[in-house]
Image (tube, grey):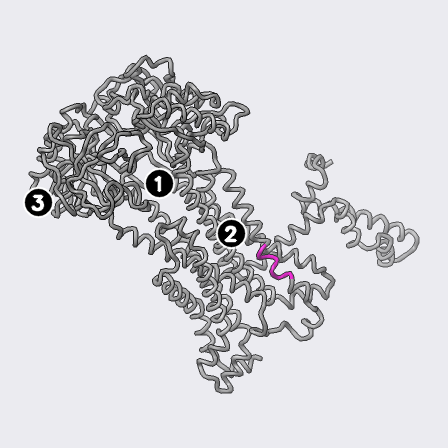
Amino acid sequence: MRAEHWLYTIPLRLRSLFLRNRVEAELEEELADHLERATEIYLARGLSPSAARAAAIRDMDGLTQQKEACRDTRRIAPIDNTFRDVRFGLRVLLKSPGSTGIAILTLALAIAANAVVFGVLNGLFLRPLNVPEPESLYGIEHSSEHNMWESYPDYVDLRDRNKSFEGLAGFSIDMVGLDTGNSPTRAWISPVTGNYFDVLRIQPYLGRLFHAADEHGPNSAPYIVLAHKYWLSHFDADRSVIGRIVRVNKHPYTIIGVAPPDFRGAMLFGLPDFFVPFINQREIEGRDTLNVRNTHSLFMLLGHLKPGVSPRQAAADLSSIGAWIGKTYPKDHGATSFVLARPGLYGNLLAGPTRAFVGGLMLLATLILLAACANLGSLFGARAADRAREVALRLALGATRARILRQFLTEAVIVSLCGGALGLWGSVALLHAISAWKPFPRFPSLDIPVQPDARVYLIALGLALVSGLLFGVVPVRQVLRANPYQVVKAGPSGAIGRGVTFRDILLLTQIAICAVLVTASLVAVRGLDRTLHNDFGFDPHHVLLAETDLNIAGYTGDRVPEMQRRLIDAMAAIPGVDAAATIGRVPLSGGGFVVAVYAENATDLTPGKALAWPERFNVSPNYFRAAGAPLLAGRAFTWHDDKDAPQIAVINRETARRLFGSAANPIGAHFKLRDGSRVEVAGLVETGKYQSLTEDPAPAIYLPVLQSPMSETVVLVRSRRDRRQVAAAMQTAIHGIDPTLPYLLEPWEQELELALFPSRIATVALGILGVMGAILSITGIFGMAAYSVSKRMRELGIRIALGAQRTELLQAALGRALRLLAMGSAAGLIFGILAGKVLAAIVYQATPKDPLVLGGVLVSMLILGLLGTWIPAQRALSLDAITLLREE
């Protein structure tokens, strides 16, 4: 036996697949040996050598037939045929690298668009929170509004009285100053109830976690659990950090543990830097609401349902407790009903709009894929027509139609797999970039967790295969109806433009889809333009903001308004500053506070009797000038409006309408607050935007900072001087007052990035899809026009010889493509108008009926048509009739 005897231990089928040349050589050798022996037998019988060999071959029924019979015994014919189809398909595709490359790139773009949108959908909705048993984890939401905020006393009642949850925990979000030995730095934290980690079933990565047993009253648990990412970035993964004392808002805290690497908390957006017990609220937030039932200080309550308990049953259980709380504490709030929601996107508040947005993008991305398949279907149909003679010859030589169709499908699958691989590579890179993207520098821990996983890879593979089958079946009708004898005798038909063909329908569909995408992108641009020119109720231009929380630097009580006035006076003294003021929280910055307001003569001050729940803003004198929000009537605040003066407020038009009616003059009128205090209306301002740009007109009231002090402080400085010079002067002034005060300095326009983010991201996403649709439209029209010109060269030559004018020539060569462009554009525009509701779910103030949008779509499609037909038109006009007719 030869040295490679180990090869013979491999089954013959595997050797035939992977050692083909060796197995074929062995077969040749074996058949030659058998033939030689049979020949020797006939030689012994007296036949001549040639006659003996011929007789031996006859006995074997032919060498070739024996080889095929031996190959059939290996049972690899289907696999072998597939390999042959793939090799032949690659050779065919490489003969026209230009069109093949365009086909692969077209499909790659479409699959990448779908994979990216699905990756976002998967990351935000399909992938569960990274906690043990996430399928049973639910958040508690008020059924009357998309709100999960809860007061601490209500949380205690819901936690202790419910019979549906194995445990109920709560958490909040706040900003603090963390001092590790140097000056304090701002940090985002999550104050959580003591049972938070136990309810979520989280185990520590390092050290230990705190528990409910660590709490013994207010400010009794000075412990910190670091987020793993923050431990790596700020403590250099130092394992000896456990037990280290740091200062949080000037108070000593002990680092007791590090959370596991994959734990993000209960929210998808935003990873806190560390966790602290909520029981330390006074030290963390500068206030104590642990026993205040009408102040909602917990961001969300959540827990695991008990086995066998449905979300509906749990909601009914909680609602019964909410009714009991309303009856027991009627002065604090009425009965509350609850529903359960997945916590990752803050229940239905973010989940609803986000689901509508991503769902709309998924629909448009699917249209992109269908347009790409229509484009490639038209291309493959044209190539099948060009290969009509090849198909006819193969049929005449005995090939079956199924065999030819399999070859066409193989070529389509090769293109689809190459396009899918390229598209997947691009989508994975883009999803990683989105996950690492920090859209809001002021929130460094805010990211978008859309890293690709196995689902994304499977979806991309499935889309590639399905796409290949979709455009690969286009030539089926041509192959099934092909008459080999007629084609071989007369040649393939060059008739173009006679009757409606399947390729015409594909191009019409593609253009209509692309027109829908162009409509969507123009709607997004118009929606963003309206958003940017909205009346915010203030003027953010030429204003710098210095945002801080005085509680971080240890300012409490009467020291807070005193420090705020020092800051205002220091800013107002900067040369070139027009106005300086403070506000607790600027509008459109996220979050906020509402307050119940009642009629002046109201005696029942329960929540259900409130006339309105306006947004509350605590502002200093000169705020309205600094914010560019002029008074419509009345007066602004002064430094005399302190806690010893009568309570006053400035309200907006919407609050005035709800309290006093639209016709009444509110100046000098009074209303009551929840605590029974009587407030006089001193001024009136226009209604603006407070929570989001898409909100309906909302009520708002402004209270003097001296009468309603709060440690959260944003200093507004309005100046037309060079922004960098003013910022430098502000930094110097703040450092001169308190060098340990951490703050964030930025233009007000940058602060609005959070509010403008939905509109901008929608515009960018739809703009990209619109550009992709335009590219597909150009390539589709170009392909149709170029194919029409190439197939009608002889006809065009005759027309030129007979004296046809340039317009007549272009009409004959490109008329069909232009008619299809017009019909497809009209159909797409109609579908775009009908899809107004879908677009409205993606873009604020979206309306495809906007005259500028309608005109923009028509102009865009006309430009795309001109671009797509430019080269074929030049080719048609440059034809030489004499040369063409001589060649024919």
Furthest residue in direction bottom, as rendered: 802
Write down the residue under mark 2: 419
Please give the name of the residue rendered at 33% of the width and 25% of the height, measured from the top-left corner.
Answer: 330
In front here: 800 or 70? 800
Furthest residue in direction right, as rendered: 45
Q: Is residue 142 left or right of residue 417?
A: left
Q: Is residue 718 above or below residue 673?
A: below
How far apart are labels 1 and 3 at the CA level? 37 Å
Write down the residue under mark 1: 437
- Mark 1 or 2: the one toward you: 1
Q: Position of residue 693 (x, y in %)?
A: 30, 46
Disc 3 residue crowd, few under 14, some 14–19, many 20+, Cα 10 Å: few
**Sequence order check: which comes first, mark 1 or mark 2?**
2
Q: Position of residue 703 (x, y in %)?
A: 18, 35
Per the rendered image, the range of residues in magenta is 470-476
Residue 258 in which image quadrant:
top left
How far apart are labels 3 and 2 at the CA level? 59 Å
